[in-house]
Amino acid sequence: MKLWGGRFRKETDSLVNDFNSSIRFDGRMYREDIQGSMAHAKMLAQQGILTWEDQRAIQAGLESVLADIESGAVELTEDNEDIHMNVEALLTQRIGDAGKRLHTARSRNDQVAVDLRLYLRHEIAEVIGQVLDLQEAVAEQAGKYQTAVMPGYTHLQRAQPISFAQHLLAYGAMLERDVTRLEDCGKRMNVCPLGSGALAGTTYPIDRWQTAGDLGFDAPCTNSLDGVSDRDYAIELLSALSILMMHLSRFSEETILWCSWEFKFIELDDAYSTGSSIMPQKKNPDVAELVRGKTGRVYGSLMGLLTTMKGLPLAYNKDMQEDKEPVFDAIDTVKMCLPVFTGMLRTMRVLPDNMRRAAGKGFINATDCADYLTKKGMPFRDAYTVVGRLVASCGDKGKTLEELTLDELREVSPLFGEDVYEALNLENCMSLRSSYGGPAVSETTRQIGELRKFIAAHRR
Ligand code: ARG
């Protein structure tokens, strides 16, 4: 008979049994479920609701159940529907009546909410660690290419000179936000629903601060209905993971572009590339493509859970059992993507000569040319027009700006002097961009230093 079978006169249809049960995916929360039960039993004994004798039997029984699940000596079964009833059934088999007393002043509704928060809290810490590893790889690669001039783009059109370090450090900044978003989500998640009961609390004199503290939560959640019906924490985590994946996807897209023959700014290590079954020459960036592709899957989990929760009346509804698969899948996906992406970045060969060559074409020093005239006294908007004309005539002549003779330059403005060639030199154009946050070496050095400080401050 089911644990809840008292009021039923028929067995559950076997299709319904399979349909209803969640053990195949919530089984992974067995540690958290047992941890929650241990804290609950201890609090019940402290409050005189259970005898200490029963508590000791429950504690020892739960320890043995935990050890046996871990070693594979016992199996979790569909017949016991979910992880909560599996653990309770195993416990009761072992210790009898004391096991049947464990569920006093508790419901699976508050139990599942505790388990999931505990589980996600742990996973968030792991994901943060992996993001910090990726940031370390960013800092390391950036450190090597602070003087490597490359074209910066807007509209995927060459725009102004930057360094490869500056480009990488943009991802460092994005990843900082990801870390703090995940931390923030972890903080808000860290309140304890245990003691909310099915929805309406309990008549027993429980101590919710005791269990909250014991389980490492900052406080009990303040409303029993909210305690069992809130899944904001799962949705927030999915949205933080979606944004993180969006960043990895953009980084992947650029990696894919950069290792194409059209760019050839980098070459991926053989260990991080794959070949074609028919084209012998191919070396494909499958890792980056898969990370980009898996981003869709994480977004799907977010949209799925948002939609599941939309329109649910308070408090618990079985729909909410659908929270776990998307959240687990998203976490598993992100945890697979991050280390492989970090390895790909660490091992990639950067080709600064090709970046420099690309920077030489596309008039990316045109703004600097206009700035030159502006510094000689011409209003910027006029200088902008003059340089626009120069660029057009360069197009006709097949020259770059710095290939124009002084006479050709003076045709459009007498303000041009010999020193213009210094001003058009791409290395100078890059290194003079020393405004706060800019690509000059002084600024990328500062950014790398701050990124390293961030990593150290957020490692646990
Ligand atoms: N397996 C359920 C879930 O994941 C646990 C809570 C079930 N509660 C209930 N009253 N049916 O949501």
Image (cartoon, rainbow, N blue to C red):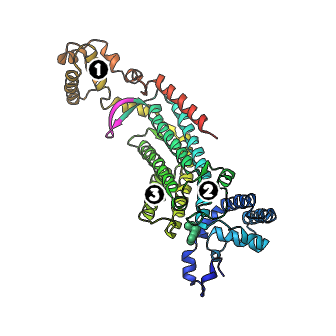
Q: Is mark 1 on a helix, strand or loop?
A: helix
* Image-quarter location of ligand 1: bottom right
252 and 46: which one is in front?
46
Give the answer, above or below, for where 460 lies relative to 377: below
- Name the residue rendered at 46%, 61% in the picture: 305
Q: Is mark 3 on a helix, strand or loop?
A: helix
Residue type marked 1: Asp
* Pointer 3 local density, CA inside 10 Å: few below 14, some 14–19, many at least 20: many
Image quadrant in which you'd find residue 202: bottom right
The label nearer to you, 1 versus 3, is 3
Q: Is mark 2 on a helix, strand or loop?
A: helix
The reply to whether the residue tagged 2 has its Cβ within 8 angstroms of ligand 1 is no
Q: Does the magenta stretch include residue 156?
A: yes
Q: Which mark is residue 119?
A: 2
- Please report contact status of discs 2 and 1: CB closer than 8 Å, yes or no: no
Give the answer, above or below, for where 393 lies relative to 345: above
The label nearer to you, 2 versus 1, is 2
Counting from the top left corner in percent of width and height, residue 407 is at 21, 15
Going from the N terminus, do you reach mark 2 or mark 1 first? 2
Q: What stretch is highlighted in magenta?
A: 153-161
Asked whether, in this view, residue 244 is left or right of residue 210, the answer is left
Q: Which mark is residue 302?
A: 3
Q: Which mark is residue 371?
A: 1
Dominant secondary structure of the residues highlighted in magenta in the image? strand
Q: Is residue 391 magenta?
A: no
* Pointer 2 local density, CA inside 10 Å: few below 14, some 14–19, many at least 20: some
Residue type marked 2: Tyr
276 and 266: which one is in front?
266
Residue placed farthest to the left in the image? 411
